[in-house]
Image (cartoon, helix red, strand yellow):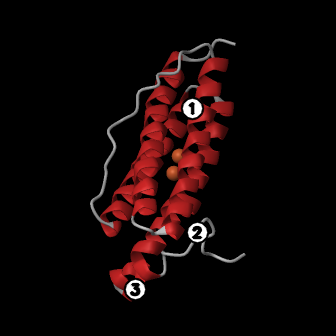
Amino acid sequence: MQGNQKVIDYMNFLLANELSARDQYFIHSRMYSEWGLTKLFDRIGHEMEDETLHAEGFIRRILMLGGTPNMVSAPVKVGKNVTEMLQFDLDTEIEVRDNLKKGIKLCEEEQDYVTRQLLVEQLKDTEEDHAHWLEQQLRLIKMLGEQNYLQSQMIGSSDPTHGH
Ligand SMILES: [Fe+2]
Ligand SMILES: [Fe+2]
């Protein structure tokens, strides 16, 4: 089925957003692992998988509409410490949220309601899961201080010393 070119082009822009969010979580999760912050590694490694699934949703939909997925990611913002990393991730999620909303409007104008549905599902993940969790962590850092917060992030389920 040949899809609307404007919608396909915009989905390629959103795909770039998802690929860069994935890469940002990729590098941040591995930095957490290197620093022994296993709980943060677990969570952010999981976010990387979520963004991969979001990217896959766009790739499959673009292909179905007869377009060519553009596998080029937008620039990645790598933080130098935990607070900065969480803040950069939140900035990325907010940017993604705003772009998804614009895409939903475009889908309505072009009457592509199935693509619209895909964007609404990703908007829900972005707002209620990713951005919300990041906001909670930044609030905890303010409440507890960064050192206490970091201490709470050392033991995760993938830590070999962690009992199940
Ligand atoms: Fe996403
Ligand atoms: Fe996300």
Depth check, front residue: 96 or 18: 18
Q: What's under tag 3, amino acid-wise?
A: Asn
Q: Which residue is mark 3?
A: 148
Residue 52 lies left or right of residue 137; in this view the side is: right
Q: What's under tag 2, amino acid-wise?
A: Asp
Query: Image quarter for residue 51?
Result: top right
Question: Where in the figure is residue 143, as x and y percent of width and height?
Answer: 39, 87
Q: Which residue is mark 2?
A: 159
| Residue depth check, mark 2 versus mark 1: number of the one nearer the observer | 2
Q: Which residue is mark 1?
A: 107
Separation of disc 3 and disc 1 at Cα? Answer: 45 Å
| Residue depth check, mark 2 versus mark 3: number of the one nearer the observer | 2
Question: Where in the figure is residue 28, as x and y percent of width and height?
Answer: 41, 55
Image marks 2 and 3: residues in contact by CB distance under 8 Å: no
Separation of disc 2 and disc 1 at Cα? Answer: 44 Å
Residue at (59% x, 47% y) in the render:
49
Image marks 3 and 1: residues in contact by CB distance under 8 Å: no
